[in-house]
């Protein structure tokens, strides 16, 4: 059974940092591109950042460029999102998701984790 | 930047009805990189259709996708109670990377 389990969310003050983690199981992790997608309260889905199968290529949405960094550890079947300089508009559920390399789609999804940026 | 528009924003329908959801792109996109997702409150989104018309693993055949260029559709041939949810289209392009449409909410009439 495929599982993606996010952790590390919570309440954080504006300007502070937070690191999300995603533990993957049930599929061949190193064959998949992995991404973070978020959903702000009452809004739709927004792609945040993606990393290719071996970490050699990273893409980011303009809204997080220079503040968020995606990374992966294939030995640990884990995905990470380092979020710096957080702002209230970063408040959202963050989903770990992935798809086969070069498929440009999102086959597997975690349940999501809430990040709230507020003073 | 490629913008996806979905219409209508909300649809009120009854189980058993047929529905076609629309996704329109601001410029032509590759059919290989157009997907549809179902999202229910409190749950993870679920991939339904990829590459415009290929059903994902385990997706019932009442779901079908089509289209090309700038106009794409997701059709549910006969609505089941569990189909009431929000549906998103998503595209990938080298210029705009990944974008989602704003979603269409299917609600029970």
Image: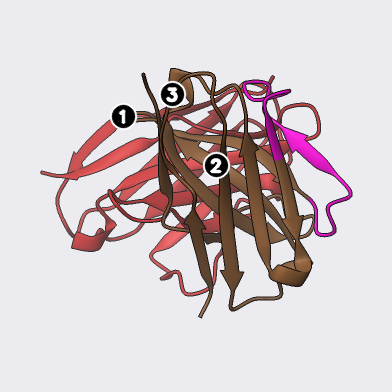
Chain colours: A brown, B red
**Residue in the picture at 71% in, 24% down:** A65
**Residue in the picture at 85% in, 58% down:** A54
Q: Is residue B16 left or right of residue A73?
A: left
Residue B107 is tagged as none
Spatial separation of the CA atoms under disc 1 and disc 3: 21 Å
Query: Residue A93 in the image: x percent, y percent?
Result: 42, 40
Q: Is residue A78 left or right of residue B13?
A: right
Viewer-closest of B41 and A115: A115
Viewer-closest of A67 and A44: A67
Query: Residue A85 in the image: x percent, y percent?
Result: 59, 21
In the rendered image, the vertical position of residue A92 relative to residue A26, given as above or below: above
Tags 3 and 2 on a common chain: yes
Q: Please give the residue where the numbered disc 3 appears in the rendered image.
A: A13
Spatial separation of the CA atoms under disc 1 and disc 2: 15 Å
**Residue in the picture at 79% in, 27% down:** B95
Q: Please give the residue where the numbered disc 1 appears in the rendered image.
A: A42
- Secondary element at tag 2: strand
Question: From which residue to which does the magenta span run?
Answer: A52-69
Q: Please give the residue where the numbered disc 2 appears in the rendered image.
A: A37
Mark 1 against mark 3, which lies toward the viewer?
3
Query: Residue B77 in the image: x percent, y percent?
Result: 34, 59
Question: How would you classify the magenta stretch by its main secondary structure?
Answer: loop
- Secondary element at tag 1: loop
Q: Earlier in the sequence, mark 3 or mark 2?
A: 3
**Residue in the picture at 40% in, 52% down:** B38
**In the picture, residue A26 is in which quadrant?**
bottom right
Q: Earlier in the sequence, mark 1 or mark 2?
A: 2
Please state the chain letter of the residue tagged with numbered disc 2 in the rendered image.
A
């Amino acid at each position: 059974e495929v599982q993606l389990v996010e952790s590390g969310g919570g309440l954080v003050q504006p300007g502070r940092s937070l690191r999300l983690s995603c533990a993957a199981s049930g599929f061949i992790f190193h064959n998949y591109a992995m991404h973070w997608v978020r959903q702000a309260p009452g809004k739709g889905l927004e792609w945040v950042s993606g990393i290719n199968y071996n970490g050699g290529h990273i893409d980011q949405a303009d809204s997080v460029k220079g503040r968020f960094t995606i990374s992966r550890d294939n030995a640990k079947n884990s995905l990470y999102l380092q979020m710096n300089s957080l702002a209230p508009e970063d408040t959202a559920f963050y989903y770990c998701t992935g798809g086969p390399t070069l498929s440009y789609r999102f086959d597997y999804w975690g349940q999501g984790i809430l990040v709230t940026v507020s003073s | 930047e490629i913008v996806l528009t979905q219409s209508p924003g909300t649809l009120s329908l009854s189980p058993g009805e047929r529905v076609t959801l629309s996704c329109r792109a601001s410029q032509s996109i590759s059919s290989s990189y157009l997907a549809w997702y179902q999202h229910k409150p409190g749950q993870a989104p679920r991939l339904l259709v990829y590459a415009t018309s290929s059903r994902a693993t385990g997706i019932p055949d009442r779901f079908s996708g089509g289209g090309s260029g700038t106009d794409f559709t997701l059709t549910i041939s006969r609505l089941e109670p569990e189909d009431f949810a929000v549906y998103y289209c998503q595209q990938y392009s080298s210029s705009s990377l990944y974008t989602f449409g704003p979603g269409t909410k299917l609600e029970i009439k």
